[in-house]
Image (cartoon, rainbow, N blue to C red):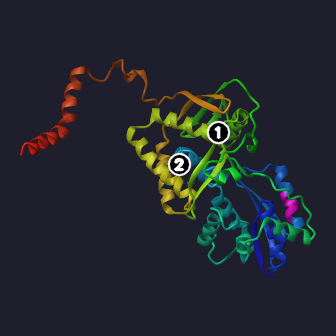
Amino acid sequence: MKKVVLAFSGGLDTSFCVPYLKNEKGLEVHTVLVNTGGFSKEEAARIEERALTLGAASHTTVDAVDTYYNKGLKYLIYGNVLKNNTYPLSVSSERVFQALEVLNTVKKIGADYVAHGSTGAGNDQVRFDIVFEIMAPEVEILAPIRELEISRKDEIDYLVKHGFNFSWEKSKYSINQGVWGTSIGGVETLSSSGYLPEEAYPSQKVKDGSEIVTLGFSKGELCSVNGEELTPVQAIYKLKEIAEPYAIGRDTHVGDTIIGIKGRVGFEAAAPLIIIKAHHLLEKHVLTKNQLNWKDQLSNYYGQLMHEAQYLEPLSRDIEAFLESTQKTVTGTVQVQLMPYHFSVLGCESKYDMMSSKFGDYGEKNKSFSGRDIIGFTKVLANPLKIFYSLQEDKDNE
């Protein structure tokens, strides 16, 4: 019997795929859950139980949070990546790493097919397919939901017919959670004018007032929260724990999809947005003008590559090398004030701070040169434009 490895989340679509691939395609189904921060150990155990109940020959759970951070999130932080100046790529950046982990199982068991439960209407089908196509061209891709264009009702009817009477109550909102935030889709995000109500967000406001948190960075990586030294992943979770009760980090992203249409998605990403803004402030103090300028341009393009399933493009490795090089002096602490629904980045301290008073105080006193030096500097700086405009005057007089 030929084997198929299915990327499995335990939701309706991937649950339908297990008996369908087994009964209709005659395949031995092996499921893989790749956890990039969206599932607790208890949830992962329940998903494994469901997969085996549905008829999977085996199930594998892969904890890929550290891999996801080290090979992806780290560079999104280095680059202060916000898609369209809004979205921290909360879920879209996960898929390539999930697909790569699924392929590890494909190769391990010698599967003939690889499958996913994406529909034919979104970005994720491309993100999975392109990784499979590039890294395992000899393996055939199956996507039953896309191929059958099947409705949710028909999926449920099929499962019930085969004896699987799970509760498939349709949630009003489609929610995808991970270490780098949560995406939220609903009827409101299908139009240009709709907006998500309070109850759509998984995290509700339970804190009032305000508090100040101190974030520590070492060579661009978050390494401490309020003086407590942590691994970067631990620090992300710690900040999330502190900030989410204020309902910080909510917004709606509007952008171009890989398949050529505009799309909207709501999200909440308290820790990612705070980390990116705090990191960016620190960079403004310790990097040069040209470093910041080139970082903005290359980081924006890196985010586009990640979002559009081009992570495997060699240019991505080139940009990562550049970003890593810029982080040598991005070390220090940043103070952030948390309040209901918003936050303020207050200030920072770093031994590499180029705004140090030993170099002068902007608008007050300069210790590096005199007023006479400025007069000469201005004459030299103005000379190219003086020449240009003098020629324009000659032309006007012709």
Dot 2 or dot 1, earlier in sequence: 2
Mark 2 and mark 1 in contact? Answer it, CB < 8 Å: no
Q: Main secondary structure of the magenta part?
A: helix
Q: Nearer the viewer, residue 169 or 353?
A: 169
- Name which quarter of the figure residue 59 lies in: bottom right
The answer to whether residue 292 is above or below residue 161 is: above
38 in the magenta segment: no
Q: Amino acid at mark 1?
A: Gly
Q: Is residue 50 magenta?
A: yes
SS type, badge 1? loop
Instruction: Check disc 2: other Cα within 10 Å, few if <14, some if 14-19, many if 20+.
Output: some
Using the image as rendered, state which of residue 288 and residue 397 is in the foreground.
397
Seen in the picture, residue 36 relative to 78 is either above or below; the reply is below
How packed mark 1 is, by other alpha carbons closer than 10 Å (few <14, some 14-19, many 20 or more), is many
Residue 154 appears in the figure:
yes
Q: Quadrant of the N terminus?
A: bottom right
* Residue 139 percent location from the top left of the image: 67, 76
Q: Secondary structure at mark 2?
A: loop
Residue at image location 75% in from the left, 51% down from the top: 173
Which portion, as a residue range, is magenta? 47-51
What numbered label is drawn on residue 84?
2
Q: Quick check: 185 above or below 162?
A: above
Mark 2–mark 1 Cα distance, whole angstroms, equals: 15 Å
| Residue at image mark 1 | 249
On the picture, is 377 further left or further right than 237? left
Instruction: Identify the residue shown where x is 84% and y is 69%.
Output: 56
Is any atom of residue 180 visible in this view? no
- For the residue pair 226 and 299, the one nearer the viewer reads as 299
* Most distant residue in the left direction: 398
Type of residue at label 2? Asn
Q: Residue furthest top?
A: 364
To which quarter of the image does residue 52 belong?
A: bottom right
